[in-house]
Image (spheres, grey):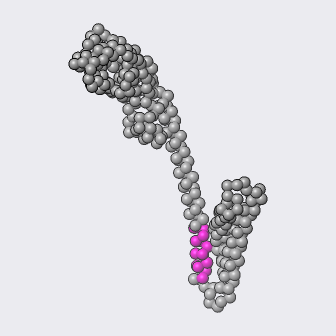
Amino acid sequence: MKLRHRYLIAGVAWALVLGPVATYSVLGAALGATWIWLYGDNPWPSETGWIIPAIGISAGAITSTCCIIFAYRHGQETEARRGQNSKLERRKAVWVTITPLGMILGLCLVLFQGKLDRESAAEIHAQRNAFFAGLLDTRHRPTQIEIIRGDEGQFRAGVQIIGRRVGPYKLIWQVQSSSYDRVLLAGEQILNLSAGRDEVAVAFSLDELAQSYRDMHLTGGGVIVDEPFEIRVKLAPQFSEKDLAMLPEAERSLLARGDSQFLVRNAAPFTVRFRIGPDGAIHY
């Protein structure tokens, strides 16, 4: 093969690289200049829909043609020089050809790897969403709270729980008065729940409630307390590290902040009456 033909092939290879680069560079510059100096955020004329792409394509075509012509003429000139049509010159032509082809191959590999990464990320995202939806559908929920007051001033709150996900849960409960938005009593229990319906008892006494009310809200004098109180419960599943890794990242953040859909709440009111004397003594 003549040296001019070797360089012609090299010119075609470089045209495949520099032609698209020139097209997108000029296209981007034309769009930017048109937006900055001509139309901005105003409606653009319909002609710009074909003029600007035509400018970019013309720049790419001119660049590709120049690459081919320059390479072919360089091969002709090299052939015309005595002693230049040597093995070394032919090797140079090969390397000049391989370089742009290697760039094209590298770009194709990068794009292909990006496609694989996107497909893998999409599959992982779908798996996490499906796992999240399954856990959300089967999680246990506190559906009802029944409060019973015993003869000795003991309160028992029976929390009805139903669900299908087997595993550990944390039941967090608080008692508040209707007059003050402050927690008077609080506690938590670790539960191992099985599929189906279950009941968990939360116990507290009137003495504990009255003393906490007095210590938090009274600074002197007496008061008669006859108002609704409320017990609030929150059931939170306890996930393993493997389960947490399978959850969507946004849901893990919500779970850490206590705003997750997995945290199911319920509440029930009850009325309490007692009197706190000026000396702080509690009377029922």
Determine the residue positioned at 43% across, 23% down: 266
For the N terminus, the image quarter is bottom right
Determine the residue positioned at 28% across, 11% down: 284
Determine the residue positioned at 58% across, 71% down: 99
Determine the residue positioned at 69% across, 68% down: 60
Magenta stretch containing residue 56, yes or no? no
Residue 131 at x, y percent in the picture: 49, 35
- Image quadrant where residue 5 sits: bottom right
Residue 256 at x, y percent in the picture: 40, 38
Between 44 and 254, the one lying in front of the other is 44
Q: Is residue 183 left or right of residue 88?
A: left
Residue 140 at x, y percent in the picture: 43, 25
Q: Is residue 243 visible?
A: no
- Image quadrant where residue 81 sits: bottom right
The main secondary structure of the magenta stretch is helix
Q: Is residue 259 visible?
A: yes
Instruction: Say if 278 sits above or below 89 in the image.
Output: above
Q: Is residue 72 left or right of residue 114?
A: right
Instruction: Say if 207 sits above or below 1 in the image.
Output: above
Q: Residue furthest bottom?
A: 82
Q: Which residues are magenta?
A: 89-102
Between 146 and 72, the one lying in front of the other is 146
